[in-house]
Amino acid sequence: MRFIDIMADFSASAAGKSGGSGFSASAAGKSGGSGFSASATGESGGSGFSASAAGESGGSGDRERQFWDEVARQGTPLVDPCPTDNALRDVTFLYRSTNARVRSVRLAANRVTDKHRQADGIMARVPGTDIWGVTLTLPADLRCSYGFSPSYEEVAPPLGGPGRPGPPAFIDPLNPEPPLTRPDQPGAGEGSSVFSGPLAPDHGMWLFDRPQGATAATRTTVTAGADADIPAEADGGSLGEDPERVRSEPTLIVSADREIGGKKYPVRVSLPSGPPAGLLVLFDGRQWFDHLGVARAVEAAGLPGLIIIGIGTHTTAERTHSLAGNDQFLRSVASELVPDIEAEAAVNGSVLPADARRIISGQSLGGLASLLMARTCPGAFDAVLAHSPSLWWSPGGTATPADLASIDGDDWTARRFREHVAGVGACDFHLAVGRREGPMVDRAGRLAEVLDGLGFSVSLSVYEGGHDFACWRGALIDGLRKVFAQDSAATVSDK
């Protein structure tokens, strides 16, 4: 059911009891800065939900409780067919505010109602109730993270952006999928929920109950080395004492600060449940391990066993300094951290084979760093997964994402590869970018052309989404599948 229909049902019921005209459905479509789709006046059958049925009896309080009970049973957002286009859906986002001081609510949906689209996220309220909502017409294969930003002000304050903190956003408690959280979101209930359209790619490997904290990557943890700060297994054993020990699921062996280039960085390391076929290095490691459970997801996807190294940072400034064109940091990762972790993994029973694939992956600035690793440390990795890489960046510290649309010719990253290809060595590149990332799509396409023209194996995926971990999760799995599918194809052709 679309929000305009919910408005109409509650209005009709109120009018029937009071004898007045109540609140008009047409007014509902115009209130709160719009945000309603023109197609929202169409049929209401797709979600299987009826506000009128949910509130047939009792007073207004009973009607609201019944309404929310029905919404909770179905889960949010509510999705209906779009009457005019089978490739679209009418999606209704609902927020329940029991705080009488709330005067406005904004839907914060990644690359849907942020940046220049913020007016589309203004939610309207069913008068006299705790029900806020907005219906948007969206692609059926869209995946995006979203949250709700309530305010005591009559006009909701704008969302934040780069270098401009905004109001907090809270998860949707009626969304059945696990929410996304970040290391820099300390507030209770803060985070993002995930909307997946009915035609969005499968991401079931990420949908497990994740414990919060450093052990979210696995259920079994062991200590390894003097830097480890996580508890040992209940039986007091160490994998180092029994290299032949069989693990039933991936095992976290490091969750501590490690020195990289003379500075301390938070590092996570997991070992696969079976023999490793390769090694994966992930930038923004705290996010991938502590908040997404990457090790379990990789195994749930049925991929070959991987030793996974997650490299994080403590602050935003440290992240920018490390990932934005810092060749010394990249060299230290390749020549110091990775060999040390490989040695520790071997002591703990995970020995890389001679033909192991070494893969570097990141997103945004981490995607940039992954690309530059191939140039800075040729031969250290034989596959790069770069998701929404920050191709706007250039040396000097003055570039911003907004500059991407105004760059003449190739961006700095493409030029660096084109001008210094002799030092890159053999490497496969798998790029992914969201269709809603504006100029990034064309820039990623141009980089793929440059790399292909230089003789590299290159793939570019454009997904329906934005600059979003909700999408990068899937891009990581897809990229890893491409890496190992290429290996399988090469093996077959050699026979």
Image: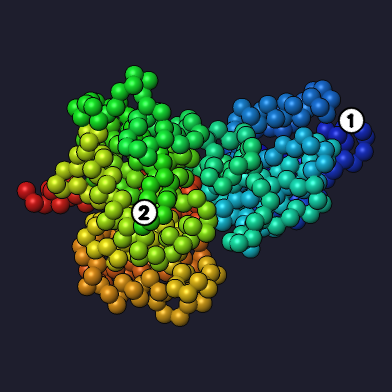
- In the image, residue 2 above or below residue 137: above
Residue 309: image location, x then y, percent: 34, 45
The residue depicted at 57 percent of the width and 41 percent of the height is 193
Residue type (three-letter) at the residue carrying disc 2? Ile
User: Can residue 63 be seen in the rendering of this structure?
Assistant: yes
In this rendering, the answer to whether 61 lies above or below 76 is above
Left or right of 247, for residue 24: right
Q: Is residue 139 left or right of residue 463?
A: right
Looking at the rendered structure, the secondary structure element under dot 1 is: helix
Q: In the image, what residue occupies the spot 40% across and 76% down?
A: 410
Residue 412: percent from left, percent from top: 40, 74
Q: Secondary structure at mark 2?
A: strand
Q: Is residue 223 above or below residue 366?
A: above
Instruction: Inspect this view and state whether residue 359 appears.
Output: no
Q: Residues within 10 Å of mark 1 (few under 14, many from 20)?
A: few
Quadrant of the drawing holding the N terminus: top right
Q: Are marks 2 and 1 in contact (CB under 8 Å)?
A: no
Q: CA distance from mark 2 to mark 1?
A: 70 Å
What residue appears at the point 82 percent right and 51 percent down from the top-left corner? 154
Residue projecting furthest to the bottom? 408
Please tell me the numbered disc located at residue 17.
Answer: 1
Name the foreground residue: 346 vs 435.
346
For disc 2, the marked residue is 260
Q: Nearer the viewer, residue 33 or 355?
A: 355
Q: How many marks?
A: 2
Residue at 39% from the left image edge and 32% from the top image edge: 218
**Which three-letter amino acid code belongs to the residue tagged 1?**
Lys
Where residue 298 appears, x then y in whole percent? 34, 39
The residue lying furthest to the top in this view is 235
